[in-house]
Amino acid sequence: MNVVRLSRLALPGMRAAKWGRIVHITSLVAKQPTPLLTISSTLRAGLSGFTRTAAAIPVGRLGRPEEIGAVIAFLCGSPASYLTGQSLLVDGGLVQGTF
């Protein structure tokens, strides 16, 4: 619950500023559960659901070309060199699915 509480504490300031980001980092067991880490797998998958729920209010506009381009530039650049085989939604929060 510490992640949920901390996120909830950050939200009022983000709403007041009309901008903000919360980044949750989990492990691969959120998407690929393992029998040896049953509790961790369950909690991390739940965190992924919480993250999507907290971010599910759509931006309410179409994306600008430079916003899409910035994501592509990041994916093609050296800062993303450890990122492989991913499918990113760049949709302003339109899709509310967890995975």
Image (spheres, helix red, strand yellow):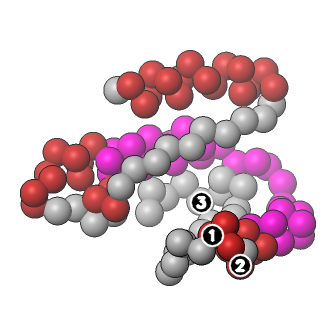
**Residue 74 x %, y %:** 73, 69
Give the quarter of the image for residue 55. Answer: top right
Q: Are marks 2 and 1 in contact (CB under 8 Å)?
A: yes
Mark 3, residue position: 95
Residue at (50%, 80%) from the top-left corner?
85
User: Tag 2: residue type?
Assistant: Cys
Classify the position of the C terminus by image quarter: bottom left
Chain-order first, disc 3 or disc 2: 2
Residue depth check, mark 3 versus mark 2: number of the one nearer the observer: 2
Estimate how packed mark 1 is, as few (under 14), some (14 to 19) or many (20 or more) residues with alpha carbons within 10 Å: few
Q: Is residue 54 shown left or right of residue 29?
A: right
Q: Is residue 46 shown left or right of residue 16?
A: left
Q: Are marks 3 and 1 in contact (CB under 8 Å)?
A: no
Estimate how packed mark 2 is, as few (under 14), some (14 to 19) or many (20 or more) residues with alpha carbons within 10 Å: few
Magenta part of the chain: 44-71
Mark 1, residue position: 80
**Residue 80 x %, y %:** 63, 70
Cα separation between marks 3 and 2: 24 Å
Is residue 61 shown in magenta? yes
Mark 2, residue position: 76
Give the quarter of the image for residue 69. Answer: bottom right
Residue at (39%, 43%) from the top-left corner?
47
Cα separation between marks 2 and 1: 7 Å
Report whether residue 28 is seen: yes
Cα separation between marks 3 and 1: 24 Å
Secondary element under disc 1, as helix, strand or loop, is helix
**Residue 90 x %, y %:** 69, 64
Residue at (44%, 41%) from the top-left corner?
50
User: Tag 1: residue type?
Assistant: Ala
